Amino acid sequence: MTFKFHPPSSVPTGQWIWVFASDEGGSHAKGAARVARVNFRAAYGASKGLTGSAYAIPTTDRHKSALPLARIASSVTEFLQFAAANPEKNFFVTAVGTDLPGVTDDVMGPLFAAAPENCSLPEKWRTYVSQARTAARTSPTGAPLTSAPDRNVERCPFCGHFTYSDLIMAPEIHCTHVVLHPK
């Protein structure tokens, strides 16, 4: 399986769907959301899912306060399922959610580790996505780790980063932070 990554601040040309972080009000006023509205016809008020030639993933509420990571992760999973169900479309994923306090590339990148081949991810997530995929293949229980919406996301008691609770319970890979930055 070949995965695509793109450089920062790039905007695709051609037949791409722009994947961006949205607020629950769908205002699309700044950053990648504004690009979605101006360049990819994202409709004002559309806060989640396909809109124009864009796909909105809500990361903040109407007042621009961060949504709980579990809700963001659930929306990411919905997007990944949509992308997998539409292999004829190409998705250009921006650095969704990384402008939120406490949500960094090493937290968001692994949420996209199950991205299908028709997605291009931010280059700065390459290491995190790659390591999350490796960790998923080497689960201590032997069961594949997935980003299904029924997985609970919580703060790791060892390092404080958000991760899946089943990873916290796995001694070898108790959280993505430890996998990505071993002591």
Image (cartoon, helix red, strand yellow):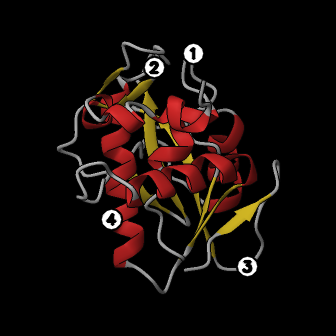
Dot 4 alpha-carbon crowd within 10 angstroms: few under 14, some 14 to 19, many 20 or more: some
Figure check: 7 above or below 21: below
| Residue furthest left in the image | 150
* Nearest-to-viewer mark from 3 and 2: 2
What residue would you read off at disc 2?
A: 66
Q: Quadrant of the N terminus?
A: bottom right
Q: Nearer the viewer, residue 31 or 173?
A: 173
* Nearest-to-viewer mark from 2 and 4: 4
What residue would you read off at disc 1?
A: 101
Q: CA distance from mark 3 to mark 1?
A: 33 Å
The reply, left or right, for residue 168 in relation to residue 160 is left
Q: CA distance from mark 4 to mark 1?
A: 27 Å
- Which numbered circle lies on residue 14? 3
Q: CA distance from mark 1 to mark 2?
A: 8 Å
Q: Nearer the viewer, residue 75 or 111?
A: 111
Sequence order check, earlier mark of 3 and 2: 3
What residue would you read off at disc 4?
A: 81
Q: Quadrant of residue 68?
A: top left
The amino acid marked with disc number 4 is Gln
Q: Nearer the viewer, residue 51 or 15?
A: 15
